[in-house]
Amino acid sequence: DAKTTQPPSMDCAEGRAANLPCNHSTISGNEYVYWYRQIHSQGPQYIIHGLKNNETNEMASLIITEDRKSSTLILPHATLRDTAVYYCIVRASANAGNNRKLIWGLGTSLAVNP
Amino acid sequence: DTGVSQDPRHKITKRGQNVTFRCDPISEHNRLYWYRQTLGQGPEFLTYFQNEAQLEKSRLLSDRFSAERPKGSFSTLEIQRTEQGDSAMYLCASSHPGQGMVYTFGSGTRLTVV
């Protein structure tokens, strides 16, 4: 599975957009980009994933560059409750085989400030 | 069914004692995962079940660790002869076969070995 690189920490003002970058320059053609977040003392929470096209759901938007070597998670109007560690994970989503584990890095610690 | 449940939330045990944790996944999810997370690190994969079959086991899991999912529903993780290095958050997650690598995590069991 491709490795990812994320900044260790970021700050964002409440109400503004939070743009969290992720570099995955060795991504393969069949690998998806997944984003999870983990609020302090809770289990991780799935946010969004994508392969090539940009994706949007009720939580966030995911922008993937055309060459797929990097992506950005966008929280359009950050709130204090969005303060968390955000993990970018690259993984083939095929159901074949028994390798089902996700490899987690250190993520980006996002602090949303009032 | 509101999510993945883990019990207990916290466990303090003396070194050398055995401990057992329980995970109840979302009922429609046939895949169940155990991860371990230490402070400041991302989750580390321990093991994975599809229904009652344990299909993958990390080399991190020493002989002191065992996991079961006897009827393909709830799962237990047992640690025998606990050591201080076992202190961590133990996370359980489940997923639906049609949802790729989208996991739903529980809130975890925090183990402290004294």
Image (spheres, coloured by chain):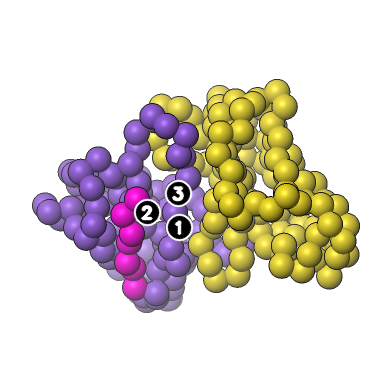
- Is residue A5 in the magenta section? yes
The part of the chain drawn in magenta is A1-7
Residue type, label 1? Trp
Image quarter (top left, top right, bottom left or bottom right) of the C terminus of chain B: bottom right
B90 to B33, vertically: above or below: below
Residue type, label 2? Ile
Q: Which mark is residue A89?
A: 2
Q: Is disc 1 placed on a helix, strand or loop?
A: loop
- On the image, the x and y values in percent for residue A8 come to 39, 74
Subunit bearing disc 3:
A
Q: Are marks 2 and 3 on the same chain?
A: yes
Q: Quadrant of residue A26?
A: bottom left
Residue type, label 3? Leu
Q: Which mark is residue A104?
A: 1
A33 to B42, vertically: above or below: above
How crowded is the residue under tag 1: few (<14 C-alpha within 10 Å), some, or many (20+)? some
Q: Horizontally, is B101 left or right of B5 in the view? A: left
Q: Determine the main secondary structure of the stretch shown in magenta.
A: loop
Q: Quadrant of residue B89?
A: bottom right
Kindly indicate whether the residue at mark 3 contacts the one at mark 2 (C-beta within 8 angstroms): yes
Subunit bearing disc 1:
A
Residue under label 3, please give it.
Answer: A102
Q: Horizontally, is A70 left or right of B52 in the view? A: left
Residue at x 48% of width, y 30% of height: B96
Residue at x 70% of width, y 23% of height: B71
Residue A100 visible in image: yes
- On the image, the x and y values in percent for residue A68 come to 18, 53
Chain letter for purple, please.
Answer: A
A72 to A1, vertically: above or below: below
